[in-house]
Image (spheres, helix red, strand yellow):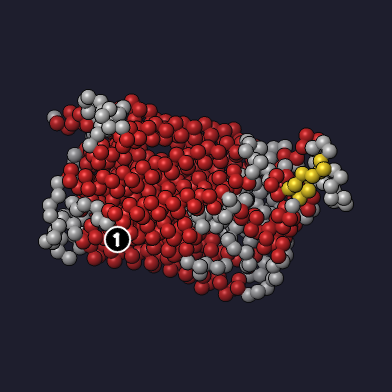
Amino acid sequence: MTRYSILLFGIIATFLIAMFGLTILPKIFIDDAVKEPVYFTPFEVTEGHKIFVREGCIYCHSKQVRPEGYGADFERGWGRASVATDYRNLLPHNLGTMRTGPDLANIGARQPGRDWHYLNLYQPRAINEHSIMPPYPWLFEVVGEEARPGRDGLRLPEPYRIEGKKVLPTDEARYLVTYLISLDQQIAGVD
Amino acid sequence: MDPGSKQSPEYSVSELDRKARFVVLFLIMSGVFWLLFGTLLALVASLKMHMPDWLAASGWLTFGRVRPLHLNTMVYGWASLTGAGVALWLLSRLLKVPVMLRGYIILAGVLWNIALVVGSIQILAGGSRGIEWLEFPVSTMVVIVLCVIIMSASVLMMLAMRRVKQLYVSVWYLIAAFLWFPLLGLVSSLPIFDTPTVQAGMNWWYAHNALGLWFTPIGLAAAYYFIPKVLGRPIYSYGLSLLGFWGLALFYNWNGFHHLIGGPVPTWFVTISISASVMMVIPVVVVAVNHHMTVVGSFRAVVNSPTLRFVVFAAMSYTFVSLQGSMQALRSVNEVIHFTHFVVAHAHIGMYAFVTMMLFGACYYIIPRVTMREWHSKSLIKWHFWLTAIGVIIYAVALQGIGVFQGFAMIDPDVPFTDTVTMTVPYLVARSVSGILMAAGHLIFTWLMFRMVWRPGEQPATPLVWNKIKEEFAS
């Protein structure tokens, strides 16, 4: 090639056309449908989502369910296929690309109990000895048994119990669990 | 513009190298620092996958922060900085003009490194942007993009002042890289992707193009330069080069949505990306044939030249990983391997076996020429090659092997989910072993680089590598 004008033009044109096709066009097609303020998102849920992002949960847990018949997502109880409107309010997106752990799009329906989540976040191996999920002790505080009367500590199994202490979730753990329980894809999607 | 216009005088190759010396060394050595840091993060993340309670007391070192930082330091630290250094040196040689705006590029490099440090601290402190490949805060990304724009300005000035009539194929790729990457970075930083699924689309358009429109062109430009250069013969076919380049420009841009197969986006976007991914077979095969036909008959030189050894390994990896990528984009294949370790290994064949090995090879050629010194030890270079090559092969075989089984287990609802985790654990251990091999290779590389740059006066009495090649081709 000797004429660099053609080179420069081609380089920019190929880029801009594809950029329009894969970023602007989806925006035009999807945005209107999802921008309607259908839900009000509670404070605890938005805070919980921030912690979900901060701790990088998405690197092991996808949050998108594939349609029935494509993969076994539905058969595993991970809920109906995800649609664009399921994600309407919370940024960054958490679609994920990895299932080192199970998909979380429907975790609120599968595990509605707060205590299960607290235990799993404090020490995953207290629930499933084969789990390779990291523990998140900084979302909990360990206090003396006498402290905070009226609040029960986590019901930890034997090897994880600390003598004379109880483990209490912090506000951050409470927000995160509220967020996780809010993830429920049993309700029909607005498409 | 008229090529070779009045103001720029003729430069000899050694003059060009001398002028490029500081800029190129600064960028490459910065990259090597981030390579070491990124390797450390990689080891921590890999060990945590099978030792989840190790270093688990503090949020700063949790897997979900270390792993994205590993990716970001390798991508924007090691591969981008070293890649930019290699690219500027190549352009200076190919256009026969000195690197322009050298002072500004040094300044950009300093800012770039500061941005990386700030961004790294922010990710470890929990301030990740939360978008894969874009975890650095927007502030860090914007600084990096501005730094690349300074380099792009330098590249365009070099193009305008060039002393050659023909633009060699490597130049096309490099010009493209320096135009595409700033555009990509800017678009990805725009606040217009404000609904989650649209952001996911932008995410994978960006992430795939960062590899396809920045690292791949630099890597291919290096392959197109070093293979004929070291062998001392022209590239096999100009026509194939042309087809390979424009094929990449046309199709690679459109690949991103194949990361969202089965996801909550309109199916026809995904279908476009699948088609484009399959079309990538054309430029990939064309480039592979072009390189193979150039090397064929000279495989002895691949054994003797450290540069060629790395470059040919990298070029073969490019062919392999790209064809694999086209296959992975098919819906039937993707159903199995999506969400498994197979894809993680695929990404590493791309960024490591192709891009990183190519940059190693380029360094082995460039550094002696800009420092005017010989490599300290031939056997250490061999160790570097075999540790990293065997390391990445173990990585790929272990994780892609188990990834297939993991995928089939995952789409079989009768297999409990926990089994899909436990079956991978021995292979995650194998991955850590492969990581230790690669880390050892990086330490050797760093030691060799360190001696080249900071330890003059200890050069071996006879040149180690060049003589072999000269003998090979003098006859």
Tell me residue B354's x, y (percent).
39, 43
Tell me residue B77's x, y (percent).
42, 48
Q: Which residue is painted at 69% across and 71% down in the image?
A: A39
Say which amino acid is labelled 1: Ala
Between A104 and B88, the one lying in front of the other is: B88
Q: Is residue A44 above or below residue A101?
A: below
Q: Is residue A6 above or below residue A142?
A: below
Query: Is B290 on the left-hand or right-hand side of B115?
Result: left
Query: Is B397 on the left-hand or right-hand side of B57?
Result: left
Q: Which residue is painted at 69% across and 67% down in the image?
A: A41
Tell me residue A142's x, y (percent).
77, 44
Residue at the outermost right position: A150
Q: Which residue is painted at 60% across and 39% down in the image?
A: B49
Q: Is residue B300 above or below residue A78?
A: above
What is the chain identity of the residue bearing mark 1? B
Identify the residue under disc 1. Answer: B153
Q: Secondary structure at mark 1?
A: helix
Tell me residue A70's x, y (percent).
60, 54
Q: Is residue B43 visible?
A: yes
Between B245 and A74, the one lying in front of the other is: B245
Residue B365 quadrant: top left
Q: Which residue is painted at 14% across and 64% down in the image?
A: B2
Query: Where is the N terminus of chain B found, in terms of image quarters?
Result: bottom left
Query: Where is the C terminus of chain B found, in terms of image quarters?
Result: top left
